[in-house]
Amino acid sequence: MSGGASGAALESLEADLLLEGVARHWGFDLRSHARPLLLRRLRRHLREERLASFSALQARVLHDAQALESLLRALSCAEPTLFTDAAFFRDFRARVVPVLRTWPSVRVWHVGCGTGEDTHALAILLHEEGLWGRCRLYASDACEGVLADARTGVVPLPDAAAARRYEESGGRGRLASWYTRDGDWAQLRPELRDGIFFTQHNLATDGSFNEFQVIVCRDVLLAFNRSLHNRAHTRLHESLARFGYLCLGRKESLSRTPQVAAYEELEGSGRIFRRVT
């Protein structure tokens, strides 16, 4: 075996041992995540932690809960900005909100909320559209560490690009009216923070916990392999009410899932689907 091949094999072995240790010791099973993406994020985390190998990371993670939280945070897909995808929020306002207005109550589940920026952006949108009083917004993530950040309602201070994305999303006022500045941070208004129910939930292992009219699960499943991807879609289907809406990321599709016939995609909406069966 050449030196390069030997090094790659050793890295792969160390990664297996790290993931096995995290699963057996902490109960977070990352072994079914898509391997290339997982390895890239693990290598990036190694550089940030200034560690030489996955074995060194394993030794730290197995003995330090904070190190585990840091690892799970590094593997999170969340983007730490408000209104990250203006087109999604614009489509949601135009295509989904008019229907939600006709329903007496709406339960929304944001899966894989990370540190909560997109959850808070969705709360702002629902507020501006007059739906907040009849909505219950649940946001979940497998990592308790990022949920702790999300619950504070504190986000990096939005810059001019974030304000522009808010306007492009159809924002009805000024983004700055939704937060109070504290140095380089923004404290979101209490009615947003207090109206969101953040809860720990692992889509890979936990079952459904309610029936929802809207599920937002964007760019979460990209990290899963095919088997886990399909199991997660089964769980989402079980959790979504008939005629409810499933919102995926723009790089995601239902085409190879067992539930493809259960949905219709809203024309011109990016990746917003309505459950029809």
Image (spheres, rainbow, N blue to C red):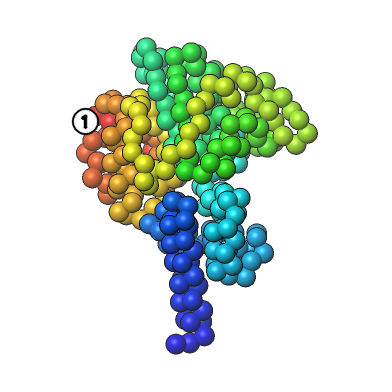
Q: Residue at x 49, y 17 (%)?
A: 132
- Expressed as whole percent of the image width and height from the top left, the position of residue 21 reads 47, 61
Mark 1 lies on a secondary structure that is: loop
Residue 83 location, quadrant? top right
- Expressed as whole percent of the image width and height from the top left, the position of residue 75 reads 52, 52
Residue 80 location, quadrant? top right
Q: Residue at x 39, y 32 (%)?
A: 215
Q: Is residue 31 visible?
A: yes
Mark 1 highlights which residue? Answer: 277
Q: Quadrant of the C terminus?
A: top left
Q: For this rendering, which residue is in front, 76 or 126? A: 76
Relative to 124, say whether 4 is above or below: below
Q: For this rendering, which residue is in front, 95 or 178? A: 178
Q: Residue at x 75, y 36 (%)?
A: 184
Amino acid type shown at disc 1 = Thr
Relative to 7, say whether 226 is above or below: above
- Expressed as whole percent of the image width and height from the top left, the position of residue 171 reads 57, 23
Q: Is residue 84 visible?
A: no
Q: Which residue in the rendered view is the most extreme toward the right?
A: 183
